[in-house]
Image (cartoon, helix red, strand yellow):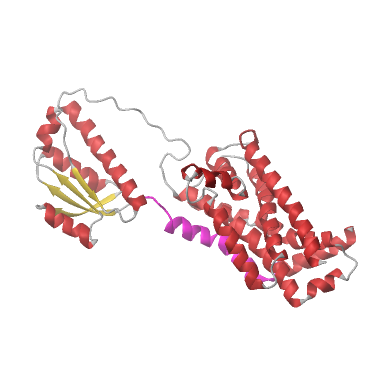
Amino acid sequence: MGIALFGLLRKELVQFFRDRLILTLILWLYTIEVVICAVALSFDVSHLPLAVVDEDRSALSRSLIQKFAVSETFDLKFQEARVATATDHLEKGDAAAVLVIPAGFERDLVAGVGVQLQFLQDGTNSNIAANAVNDALQIVQRQEREALPAAGKKGVAVPLIRIWYNPDLTTSGFIVLSMIALAGMMVGVIHPAASIVREKERGTIEQLLVTPISTLELFLAKVTPTLIMGVLSIFPSLVIVRVFDVPLQGSLLLFLVLTAIFLLSAIALGVLIAAYSRTLQQALLLSFFGLFPLMFLSGSLTPVEAMPPFLQSLSLLSPLRYYMDIIVGIFLKGAGLAVLWDEALALLVIGVTLFIFSLWVFRRRVQ
């Protein structure tokens, strides 16, 4: 078994690394694709065009407007005298938000009387709208805290808030890590599926089976190049992680080991798809048919806790869910195996089970 397996592995690795197109696509997924998604899918809100109607025209109202103007969230584009004119900008899409400061704003604020500001926000994109409203509330609360001591008021108790792991509350770091995880899943599933089905279409897999090799050796030879390339692709991804200032708080060695275990699950799914596919088109369609549910249930797009209970239970079968917890835990939280042992164990159980099952199906389907 050793000599035959070594020869098969050498043949598959040489063939794999000679395919420049495949290598380019894999590196693209782990690098350029990660950058594009991190920039394009960012939910960070910045430079939203703002229209302001100041009916008070006081020192405090001007101070509040200045705070909005210097914030990274809003860009002061319009200052109007009438609310109707400002809302026209909102309807036309020239402004994303409208701030209306009523007459008597400074007087009521200093007197400790409740002040009602009007903030109109374009809600067509709910994520942007929610973040913008939250930022606007923080600006107004900061103005209120500064005005009350100046007026000799005690004000209200303001809690000291500390954000752990991501103090700037940026989404780019999480998106970069989730895209790396998704790239590993895509490469792990699609490449072995396409490779095996291509051998079927060419008829070379039957030629290999009449040689003195076993289906186990053929199976290992087909999955090993993808496993090696998947682990090696992590290193150029680390450059992208560094570019986006995502810290690696935990152990790189632990991350590589758990990545290899995760790739076992992805590769096993690819082999299962190849076993039941007759053509390359079928293999690709089946791959995407399985990839999208796994992606949606992983927590990379929507928090698992926000899903219906049925889908939360279903997500426990997804190896990508556990890998997302692992990659975020190691990079952002600095978690070690003592913290991540349950995710690692679940990933190992799923990976080994899928690997053994895919080997059994592969033996039955190719013989």
Q: Is residue 163 left or right of residue 30?
A: left
Magenta stretch: includes residue 34: yes
316 magenta-colored: no
Q: Quadrant of the C terminus?
A: bottom right
Q: Which residues are magenta?
A: 17-44
Q: Position of residue 90 (x, y in %)?
A: 21, 57
Left or right of 154, for residue 28 = right
Image coordinates of residue 54 in percent, x first then y, are 12, 46
Residue ID at (67%, 57%):
269
Quarter of the rendering containing residue 212: bottom right
Q: Nearer the viewer, residue 174 or 124?
A: 124
Give the farthest residue toward the bottom: 202
Q: Is residue 305 at all visible to an observer of this figure?
A: yes
Q: Determine which quarter of the picture holds residue 163.
A: top left
Task: Kindly identify the residue that appears in the image at 68 percent across and 63 percent down.
Answer: 273
Q: In this view of the protein, which residue sits in the foreground, 136 or 123?
A: 123
Q: Quadrant of residue 7?
A: bottom right
**Residue drawn at (61%, 56%) of the image:** 185
Q: Is residue 269 above or below residue 353?
A: below
Residue 51 vs 218, above or below: the answer is: above
Measured as percent of width and height from the top left, residue 348 is found at: 70, 44
* Residue 24 visible in the displayed image: no
